Amino acid sequence: MENTEKMILTKLDSIEEMISSRKEILNMRELAKYTGYSESTLYKKVHYNKIPFSKPHGKMLFFERKKIDKWLLQNSSMSNSEISLEALKRVHSKK
């Protein structure tokens, strides 16, 4: 019976994760799971306006997945192959 309960709980967790991965608006707990940051780190980022958030009724925090994705991908670096490809494009476009 114990193995069956563990298996059911594991499957439920998996289903919950799948459902929350499709949500456009996340709460703090979901955002922590999504980004891998701890909730306390995220609260600090909110406090210093380092992360996009909404606070519609002055208490609960909500995060738009698209804005979070953009925030997570800011300051990205190009790989060596991307740099080479970009250099080739620029050389060929100047001819």
Image (cartoon, grey):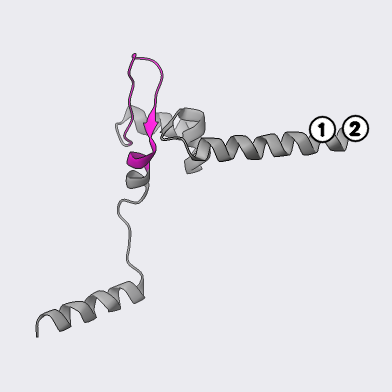
Quarter of the image where one finds residue 66: top left
Of the pair 78 and 25, the residue shown nearer to us: 25
Residue at horizontal 16 percent and vertical 82 percent from the top = 91
**Which region of the structure is painted magenta?**
51-68
Q: Position of residue 24 (x, y in %)?
A: 41, 35
Magenta-span inclusion, residue 62? yes
Q: Would you say 74 lies left or right of 61 here?
A: left
Q: Distance between the residues labelled 1 and 2?
A: 6 Å
Question: Which residue is label 2 attached to?
Answer: 1
Residue at 16% across / 83% down in the picture?
A: 92
Q: In this view, does 61 lie above or below 42?
A: above
Horizontal placement of 8 versus 68: left or right? right
In the rendered structure, are the residues bearing label 1 and label 2 in contact, judged by CB atoms less than 8 Å apart? yes
User: Dot 1: what SS?
Assistant: helix
| Kind of residue indicated by mark 2 | Met
Q: Name the quarter where the C terminus is drawn.
A: bottom left
Picture coordinates of residue 19 (x, y %)? Answer: 55, 36
